[in-house]
Image (cartoon, helix red, strand yellow):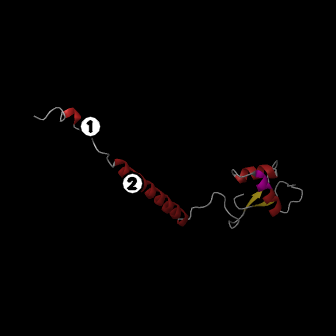
């Protein structure tokens, strides 16, 4: 009566194209958009809360350092520079303290750049 064309094994043989790809693309696109917006808002919030730059600017109050026996401008710059290029820090210390030849003596008070 029905023939062999309605066999259970062939029930899904001629399935039409589904639109799952379109739905998935919309979901992925929406997730990406929400993530980008969230990151932008988080960055603005961090700035609004006053997160400081890792390298402070010149508005910060400078510190002082008392020269110890055996110190040099280079080692002072390495010690107080904390990761910055010592050449730049040495130059800043020499300029701020008007050290023409870079000579320092124990007991001398040096003015340091802001978080040198």
Q: Residue at x 26, y 37 (%)?
A: 13
Q: Quadrant of the C terminus?
A: bottom right
Indicate the secondary structure of the residue bearing disc 1.
loop
The stretch of residues the image draws in magenta is 86-90
Of the two numbered discs 1 and 2 on the same chain, state the one appearing first in sequence.
Answer: 1
Camera-nearest label, 1 or 2: 1
Q: In terms of image quadrants, where is residue 29?
A: bottom left
| x and y percentages locating residue 104 in the rendered image | 85, 55
Q: In this view, does 64 lie to the left or right of 53?
A: right
Relative to 107, say whether 1 is above or below: above
Query: Is residue 11 or residue 36 the one in the foreground?
Result: 11
Q: Is residue 9 left or right of residue 45?
A: left
Query: Is residue 54 or residue 69 the one in the foreground?
Result: 54
Dot 1 alpha-carbon crowd within 10 angstroms: few under 14, some 14 to 19, many 20 or more = few
Q: Distance between the residues labelled 1 and 2?
A: 28 Å
Q: Residue at x 47, y 60 (%)?
A: 37
User: Which disc number belongs to residue 13?
Assistant: 1
Indicate the secondary structure of the residue bearing disc 2.
helix
Q: Is residue 31 left or right of residue 8?
A: right
Dot 2 alpha-carbon crowd within 10 angstroms: few under 14, some 14 to 19, many 20 or more = few
Q: Residue at x 62, y 60 (%)?
A: 53
* Magenta segment includes 83: no
Q: In this view, does 106 lie to the left or right of 5?
A: right
Q: In terms of image quadrants, where is residue 92?
A: bottom right
User: Total label count?
Assistant: 2
| x and y percentages locating residue 41 in the rendered image | 49, 62
Q: In terms of image quadrants, where is residue 6?
A: top left
Instruction: Tell me the chief SS of the magenta region.
Output: helix
Please name the residue that numbered disc 2 is placed on: 26
């Amino acid at each position: 009566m029905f023939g062999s064309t309605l066999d259970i094994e062939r029930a899904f043989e001629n399935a039409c194209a589904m639109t799952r790809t379109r739905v998935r693309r919309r979901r992925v696109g929406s997730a990406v958009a929400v993530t980008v917006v969230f990151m932008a808002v988080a960055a603005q919030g961090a700035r609004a809360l006053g997160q400081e730059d890792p390298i402070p600017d010149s508005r910060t109050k400078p510190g002082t350092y008392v020269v110890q026996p055996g110190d040099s401008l280079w080692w002072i710059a390495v010690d107080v520079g904390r990761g910055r290029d010592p050449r730049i820090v040495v130059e800043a210390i020499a300029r701020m303290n008007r050290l023409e030849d870079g000579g320092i003596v124990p007991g001398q008070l040096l003015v340091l750049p802001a978080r040198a």
